[in-house]
Amino acid sequence: MTLIDPVLLKSRLGLLAGRFDVDALAECDSSSSELMRRADRGAPAGTVVVTDRQSAGRGRRGRSWSSAPEASLTFSVLWRFSGPPGRLAGLSLVVGVALAEALEMLGAQGVCLKWPNDVLLRRDNAYAKLAGILVELSTDRRGTQAVIGIGLNLQAPPESLPQPVAGLDQALAATPDRHVVLAAILGHLAAVLDRFAVDGFAGLKMDWQQRHAWQGEAVQLLGEAAEPLPGRCLGVDDDGALLLETASGVQRIFSGDVSLRPIGSALGVRRA
């Protein structure tokens, strides 16, 4: 499979082509690491690095993210915002909204969001991970810089993984060309980030919540060193914090893994 062609991608982007500067690499350590190095050298907002293979791809909480050109789309986008990082609460959630909107526009069915940064595919009342998002922030004299890393499975990875995974080909009758998929995502990402810069997460909360896989469901919050915390998921607040209704009241959660807990079961069952 050939590399993403930036010229062909520009034609797919249409009027938005001027907002993005795309470079396609055959291989790198990770698209986000490469983009950070370019940002340090003054790369403009809208710079995109897309890679066919990455040797040190990473996800949230230090997890790895593998990629292969025929089965995935792996890229990172540089965006800049005025003001301090505290204004960007919920950024990873709105990136999920953009990704879901783009896939839905392409015809995908069953796309859901999992707090704080996963895109899931629902099939037969079960969920599998379709895409992951990793946002990394830094500040300089111009404000706050966000490197937004996205890994999307075009096909489900063949190897055994700790959690169920899915590919975009399972949500569509035919998977579009990678240029079409990337252009759709970048277009929706630009629109969503423009809204976010003005209204913050509060202006996009309902867009996220209507796609929330666990809305109103019994869940367990899993932490690395804490006992599982059971409760009912009420969604998120205007800052993007998870709202968990527990025996001691509603708690705002800022980090952790969420797993579905079947009603009447004493143990959590990982579903995504």
Image: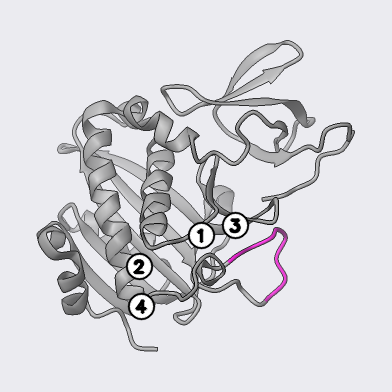
**Residue pointed to by mark 2:** 181
Q: Earlier in the sequence, mark 4 or mark 1?
A: 1
Q: CA distance from mark 4 to mark 3?
A: 21 Å
Local packing at callout 2 (Cα closer than 10 Å; few below 14, some 14-19, many 20+) is: many
Q: Is residue 161 magenta?
A: yes
The mark nearer the N terminus, 2 or 3, is: 3
What amino acid type should be assigned to the residue bearing mark 1?
A: Arg
- Whole-percent x, y for residue 102 in the image: 36, 56
Disc 4 and disc 3 in contact, CB within 8 angstroms: no
Q: Main secondary structure of the magenta part?
A: loop
Picture quadrant where residue 183 is located: bottom left
Q: Decide which of 148, 265 is in the foreground and name it.
A: 265
Circles 4 and 1, Cβ within 8 Å, touching? The answer is: no
28 over 104 or under it: above or below? below
Tell me the distance, in whole angstroms, between the alpha carbons under discs 4 and 1.
25 Å
- What are the residue bounds of the magenta stretch? 159-166
User: Looking at numbered disc 4 in the image, what kind of residue is underneath it?
Assistant: Asp
- Eye-nearest disc, 1 or 3: 3
